[in-house]
Image (cartoon, grey):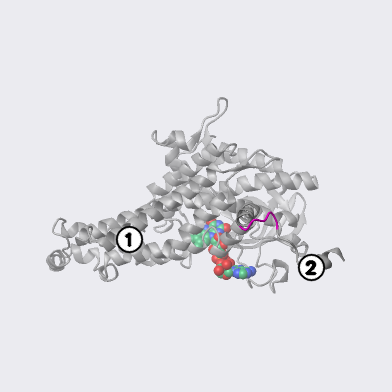
Amino acid sequence: MGLRTPEQFRSSLRDGRTVYHKGKRVEDVTTHPVLKVGVDSSAVDYELAENPETRELAVITPPHGEAYSRFFLPPRSPEDLLRRRKLAETGSRICFGFPPFAKEGGSDAVNAVAILAAHCDAANGTPYAQRLEAFRRYLQREDLSISITMTDVKGDRALRPSQQADPDLYVRKVRRVDGGMIVRGAKAHITTAPYTNEFCVLPTRAMAEADRDYAISFAIPANTRGIRIIARSGPWEEGLVDYPVANRAAMIEGLVIFDDVFVPDDRIFLEGEWQFAGPLAAMFANYHRVTAAAYKYPFAELLVGAAQLAAESNGIERVAHVRDKIAWLVMYSESILALSEAACLKAHQDPLTGLYYPDPVMGNAAKFFFADNYHQAVKAVQDIAGGIVATVPSEHDWNNPETRGDLEKYLAGSQKLSAEDRFKIIHLVKDLVASELGGFWEVTSLHAEGSLAAERLATYAHADMKRYRAAALRAVGLTSLTLSRETAATRSA
Ligand SMILES: Cc1cc2nc3c(=O)[nH]c(=O)nc-3n(C[C@H](O)[C@H](O)[C@H](O)COP(=O)(O)OP(=O)(O)OC[C@H]3O[C@@H](n4cnc5c(N)ncnc54)[C@H](O)[C@@H]3O)c2cc1C
């Protein structure tokens, strides 16, 4: 089939899938007033392949065979990772900082499975790597959208999957049947779930032997019998002035329920090899945190621009503390770019598959830096814009002849700008940092792509501690530490 048009992507979603939104079954996600905003954002991944300006970045054209999406290229060099990063950034910029996410997260998952499946096969003689590569070719050929489907609902966080009172709180294999397995459970917060073609399911954490049935990975079409998707509600109220970003683009998450779903053998990439669950989750994070930093960079850029416009519209762009804050916002934004590019440039090659993956320390630092400073960035924008972002009347009042004159007169700011432009800028800032969308972004910055704790853990695990220790040891004139007499005695006993 080859590359699809945005319209072909949209029509593929009219496939009888089971989706709910705000208590109602959705007949057609492509025409639903809320879900449509997400569908149209996802379609941007397909538009990038058609647009002559972005086609070279978005499309791989092999010398023989059909062109396919760059997201489905197995990364064989740091340059491949850099180009993929750039593509994720480009899509997000078009969608005002929302990743289109038709392929971004799902292809990170495919890359991670490709590496761990090969390692599992080498250790256990399983056939997963060839299945995964056949699936990757299928994605290339059919140009499908695919969601990363990893986060389990998890129940009691202090308990392992097999220790939960309800055994279905992590997605699990219920039983093996002829030609496949039956799975049950639910995955939470799955971006694009209501309007994706495929789910790529991964374990969310390391597993112990008792969790064997939970150590599963597979891919499955979204309209498979037994799959139900409950979409999150949206913040969308009417008005392109009142909500200029929230109404122009979106990523919409869903709770994905697997109610005894049959997964055929050729779609299973892990089935009980529990030792590989943790490494698979970690490898996915290596790819995904860099992709995340790539698509968050345009959002940070938008925050800088909004702060600058707010300053100009209030006539305070030359004030020292305002410039300091905007300079900090610029550093914040550009550091996200620098760290995510560095993660690609310092990429590592998996010795078994030859595939490249981003440097885990740089990649985790990129995502962590974005998340840990996000609320600080919001604070700077809110500070500069003033209280009006919380109290501004709506565009309905602007359009009402009875109140328009009052708003034009009393919402005037800098003498250099029209009151109407200031009104629009105030609403932009409100939409970004003082609305339901603003709150959504605050939580999303912390949790999406893994919590701050997960990024710290990964950084510590991958840090070159030998090098750091050697630097400090050298400074005190040592090459290694000497054991105390008690420890030496215990060790030799
Ligand atoms: C907008 C958005 C989009 C997302 N998109 C996707 C997606 O497309 N696909 C996907 O798979 N996931 C997605 N996620 C999920 C995201 O990866 C998770 O939110 C994240 O991993 C945190 O998990 P949680 O939400 O269950 O929070 P929790 O795990 O409940 O974390 C809450 C706090 O508890 C701590 N905690 C939890 N368990 C433990 C423990 N055992 N020991 C110590 N501390 C613990 C955490 O560190 C954190 O501080 C998305 C999330 C958001 C908000």
The percent coordinates of residue 91 (x first, y second) are: 43, 46
The stretch in magenta equals 476-480
Label 2 – label 1 distance at C-alpha:
54 Å
| Left or right of residue 481, residue 442 in this image | left
The percent coordinates of residue 307 (x first, y second) are: 30, 58
Q: Which residue is mark 1?
A: 325
Question: Would residue 429 be counted in the magenta stretch?
Answer: no
| Left or right of residue 225, residue 372 in this image | left
Quarter of the image with the C terminus in it: bottom right
The residue located at (18%, 58%) in the rendering is 420
Observer-side mark, 2 or 1, equals 2
Question: Secondary structure under badge 1?
Answer: helix
Name which quarter of the figure residue 431 lies in: bottom left
Do the numbered discs 2 and 1 sit on residues whose CB atoms are within 8 Å?
no
Magenta part mainly helix, strand or loop?
Answer: loop
Q: Which residue is mark 2?
A: 485
Disc with the residue nearer the chain's start (2 vs 1): 1
The residue located at (77%, 44%) in the rendering is 122
The residue located at (13%, 59%) in the rendering is 415
* Residue sitting at the far front: 477
Question: Secondary structure under badge 2?
Answer: helix
The residue located at (76%, 67%) in the rendering is 484
